[in-house]
Image (tube, rainbow, N blue to C red):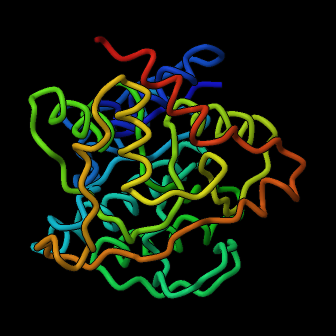
């Protein structure tokens, strides 16, 4: 297939490009090549490329930036996605949209299924939910809700933690945010399997097992041979952040199971692989 990947300079865009190019012809799009908020640019680019599939992770992922500037967040995360979907429709391409666990309210105490109600408490979550609904209005499209991302190609939560500890700094991490963690390369591999099988719809996607951000950071430090005591757990509402954080965001991968797909490995195994691949 010919596959266009938006946001290719971003964390997930990098991982998607790395995985998809092993089996497909990939066009890695950055904002300099096609700004998703400019419909004419996106339309012209897709017309020139003629992709069969557009994988769309591009957007503003910073939850606090979205809270600070809702208009810009909606312009990029929703209207940008609408531009991508409409341009893809003109060239007959399917769309695989990268959504988020932030579409939930965080008040549940058992894993969220794809069918659970979505009541996002943040601007970021609302922009992604609006985009997700727009994408899935077409039964030929896909949406994948992912969680805390780590992987090669761009700075991420895990890398920031390790860098601070290596600089002899302590790291304050939320101790009360329980959720899923997602290794970008594992998630990209699973997305590739689903789209190759031509099974459109809504999917939860993460590495197996639940962890707090505190546990993820501590495990990363230990695997890197660093002092895990430098990771300091703190309640999220005491960390001075603009947007509220979900206290519970564990996702059940019901759609993958029912579709007969093997679930990704545990977050601990994936994290160990990622840490081993990092430059020392």
User: Residue 243, how many percent across, how many down?
Assistant: 21, 76
Identify the residue at image location x=27%, y=79%.
Answer: 244
The foreground one among 119 and 110 is 110
Q: Position of residue 161 (x, y in %)?
A: 24, 40
Quarter of the figure with the N terminus: top right
Rendered location of residue 257, percent (x, y): 84, 55
State the image quarter where residue 65 is shown: bottom left
Q: Is residue 149 left or right of residue 245?
A: right
- Whether residue 41 is visible, yes or no, is yes
Give the x, y percent position of residue 105.
Answer: 46, 84
Q: Taking 129 as reference, is 44 above or below it?
A: above
Taking depth in this image into account, of 134 and 65 the one nearest to the observer is 65
The quadrant of the image that shows the C terminus is top left
Viewer-closest of 178 and 188: 178
Please name the residue shown 64% across and 74% down the image. 112
Q: Is residue 131 above or below residue 31?
A: below
Indicate the quadrant where residue 13 lies.
top left
Q: For this view, does 179 lie left or right of residue 242?
A: right
Q: Residue at x 37, y 78 (%)?
A: 126
Q: Is residue 271 above or below residue 64?
A: above
Q: Residue at x 41, y 39 (%)?
A: 150
In the figure, is residue 220 to the left or right of 155? right
Name which quarter of the figure residue 151 lies in. Answer: top left
């Amino acid at each position: 297939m010919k596959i266009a990947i938006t946001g290719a300079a971003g964390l997930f865009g990098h991982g998607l490009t790395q995985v998809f190019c092993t089996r497909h012809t990939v066009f890695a799009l950055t904002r300099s090549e096609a700004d998703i908020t400019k419909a004419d640019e996106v339309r012209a680019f897709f017309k020139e490329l003629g992709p069969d599939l557009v994988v769309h992770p591009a957007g503003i992922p910073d939850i606090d930036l979205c809270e600070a500037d809702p208009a810009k967040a909606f312009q990029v995360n929703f209207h940008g996605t609408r531009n991508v979907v409409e341009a893809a429709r003109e060239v007959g391409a399917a769309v695989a949209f990268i959504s988020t666990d932030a579409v939930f309210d965080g008040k549940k105490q058992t894993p969220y299924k794809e069918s659970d109600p979505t009541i996002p408490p943040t601007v970021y979550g609302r922009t992604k939910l609006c985009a997700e609904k727009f994408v899935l209005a077409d039964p030929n499209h896909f949406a994948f809700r992912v969680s805390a991302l780590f992987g090669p190609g761009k700075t991420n939560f895990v890398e920031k933690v390790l860098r601070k500890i290596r600089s002899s700094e302590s790291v304050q991490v939320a101790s009360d945010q329980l959720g899923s963690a997602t290794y970008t390369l594992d998630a990209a591999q699973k997305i590739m399997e689903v789209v190759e099988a031509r099974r459109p719809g809504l999917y939860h996607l993460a590495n197996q097992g639940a962890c707090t951000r505190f546990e993820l950071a501590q495990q990363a430090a230990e695997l890197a041979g660093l002092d895990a005591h430098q990771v300091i757990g703190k309640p999220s509402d005491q960390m001075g952040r603009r947007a509220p954080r979900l206290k519970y965001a564990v996702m059940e991968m019901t759609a993958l199971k029912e579709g007969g797909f093997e679930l990704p490995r545990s977050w601990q195994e994936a994290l160990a692989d990622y840490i081993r691949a990092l430059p020392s």
